[in-house]
Structure formats: structure tokens, C-alpha cells
Image (tube, grey):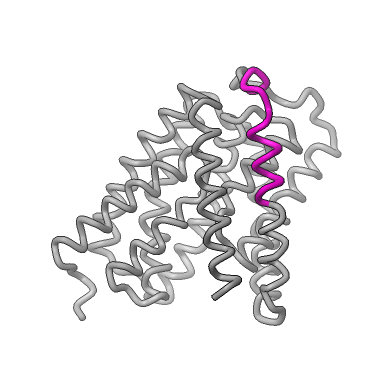
């Protein structure tokens, strides 16, 4: 098959799903749960699907990160502290994935997802009304925890993967104490870092199909633009439902993989 072109209907469906993935990802993370299946449904082999997805995901995440940053919804130092240690964490997680079975990770995630949902969704909206809410103390312990979050999430991303941005947002919100909008903005920075790193790996391996990837990426940009705008304006009123939907989708995927 000539991967530089796709049948028109397949390309349209791919673009629509990548648009939706970008919309969801810019609010609550988890866009890969939609975009990777979209590439597979279009007929891409797994390695080309993963590589081309990183192209379109990097394009969209760049836009949403810029929007969050320009509107003051990114605590850059905390986000960079997590992003910096996500790299070695991801490398270690990837090595562990080669040597260890993933069943234990799946079971842990199936337990953690309902707990995470309960912790976030049962908080009153008033607790998240201040979109600029930040921790009051920024000592060594705070930055160390931010780095450890990045390392742990990087390990998870390298070992298992789905919903990485969602868990970054969750931990920056519940552990570091950022408001939901700032936590979502911080997660975009960490996601952007990991997306670019993976994109370069797939680029040098020749596992990217440029024409459909760029077309889907433009739709991903549109989805990220709209989604980040909604999250910036609406805060927890839009982030919480999107977060719940992503967790439900992630739970279904992990459960399906565990039973398959």
C-alpha cells in the first residue's frame, strides 16, 4: 500500500478522530486513546501508526501549550522540573518493559483509576474556582516532589503508556496543589517534551508518513486550540467531565487489554 496517500473516506475519518483526540487531550490528557486507534483503523501498521501519531500529536500539543502559557496557566518551573526527570524515567521504564510482565501494572492501574476519579470528581467546584491557585511553599521538597512526579510518570509512559498526560495533571493537582487549569497547563509542557522526544526517535527510524500525518496534525491543532480555549475559560466545569471521560476510556482499554 502507498502510505503517502489514503482513500478520501479513511483520511476524513482519521482527521476527525485526531481532531477529537486533540480536543480531549488539551483539556484532560489521554488523546492517544483516540488517535492511535484512528491510525490503526486507517490501516497503518503499528510502528507507522505510533510514529505518525507522534507527528500529529506534537503539532497539536505545541499549540495548546502555547495557549496555556500565554494565558498564565502554566507554572513553568514546576512543569519543567517534572519534564526534566520524565526523560530518565521513561528510559528506565522502557528497559523495564523489556524484562518485566505488564500484567501487574495493568492491575495497579485498574485499582488507581477509580480512586483518582473519586479524588478529583468529588471535590467541590469551588475548590478549583481560582484558576491561578498555586502552592504557597516552593522549597526544595516541592521541587523534589515535582521531579519525582516527572520521573514516575516517565517510567509509566515508558513501561505502559496510555493516559500519561492525564496522570501528570492529576498529580500536579492533588499532590502539588495546583488548580485544575494550571495542572492541565503543566501537563501540556510535560507531554510536549515527551512527544518531541518520541517524534525524533521515530523520525530517525523512518517510521513517519508525512502527508496523512501533516493533514491529521492540522486537525489536531484545531482540536487543541478549541479544547485549550474551553479549559482556560471554563476551568473545572469542562475539565472535570473531560477528565471523567478520559478515565472511563482508559479503564475500558486497560481492562480490555488485561482480559484479551
Extreme residue toward the left, this view: 8
Q: Quadrant of residue 230?
A: top left
Q: Is residue 68 above or below residue 116?
A: above
Q: Position of residue 247 (x, y in %)?
A: 57, 48
Q: Quadrant of residue 4?
A: bottom left
Q: Is residue 173 above or below residue 32?
A: above
Front-lying residue, 258 or 56: 258
For residue 39, side relative to residue 93 (left or right): left
Q: Position of residue 131 (x, y in %)?
A: 59, 22
Front-lying residue, 93 or 122: 122
For residue 11, side relative to residue 82 (left or right): left
Q: Quadrant of residue 78?
A: top right
Extreme residue toward the front, this view: 259
Q: Position of residue 86 (x, y in %)?
A: 66, 55
For residue 40, side relative to residue 163 (left or right): left
Point 62% across, 41% down: residue: 169
Point 39% across, 61% down: residue: 53
**Quarter of the C terminus within the rendering:** bottom right
Front-lying residue, 211 or 47: 47
Q: Position of residue 218 (x, y in %)?
A: 28, 48
**Quarter of the N terminus within the rendering:** bottom left
Q: Is residue 28 above or below residue 43?
A: above
Is 117 in the magenta? yes
The majority secondary structure of the magenta stretch comes to helix
Point 41% across, 75% down: residue: 46
| Residue extent of the magenta highlight | 113-128
Amino acid at each position: 500500500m502507498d502510505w503517502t496517500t489514503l482513500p478520501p473516506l479513511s483520511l476524513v475519518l482519521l482527521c476527525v478522530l485526531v481532531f477529537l483526540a486533540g480536543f480531549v487531550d488539551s483539556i484532560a490528557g489521554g488523546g492517544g486513546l483516540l488517535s492511535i486507534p484512528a491510525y490503526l483503523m486507517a490501516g497503518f501498521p503499528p510502528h507507522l501508526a505510533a510514529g505518525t501519531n507522534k507527528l500529529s500529536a506534537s503539532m497539536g500539543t505545541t499549540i495548546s501549550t502555547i495557549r496555556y502559557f500565554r494565558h498564565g496557566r502554566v507554572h513553568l518551573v514546576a512543569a519543567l522540573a517534572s519534564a526534566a526527570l520524565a526523560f530518565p524515567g521513561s528510559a528506565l521504564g522502557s528497559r523495564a518493559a523489556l524484562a518485566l510482565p505488564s500484567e501487574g501494572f495493568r492491575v495497579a492501574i485498574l485499582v488507581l483509576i477509580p480512586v483518582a476519579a473519586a479524588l478529583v470528581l468529588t471535590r467541590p467546584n469551588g475548590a478549583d474556582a481560582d484558576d491561578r491557585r498555586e502552592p504557597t511553599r516552593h522549597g526544595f521538597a516541592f521541587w523534589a516532589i515535582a521531579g519525582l512526579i516527572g520521573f514516575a510518570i516517565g517510567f509509566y509512559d515508558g513501561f505502559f503508556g496510555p493516559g500519561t498526560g492525564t496522570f501528570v495533571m492529576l498529580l500536579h493537582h492533588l499532590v502539588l496543589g495546583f488548580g485544575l487549569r494550571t495542572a492541565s497547563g503543566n501537563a501540556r509542557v510535560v507531554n510536549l517534551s515527551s512527544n518531541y522526544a518520541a517524534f525524533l526517535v521515530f523520525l530517525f527510524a523512518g517510521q513517519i508518513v508525512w502527508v496523512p500525518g501533516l493533514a491529521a496534525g492540522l486537525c489536531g491543532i484545531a482540536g487543541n486550540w478549541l479544547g485549550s480555549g474551553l479549559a482556560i475559560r471554563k476551568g473545572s466545569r469542562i475539565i472535570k467531565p473531560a477528565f471523567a471521560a478520559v478515565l472511563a476510556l482508559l479503564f475500558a482499554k486497560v481492562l480490555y487489554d488485561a482480559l484479551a
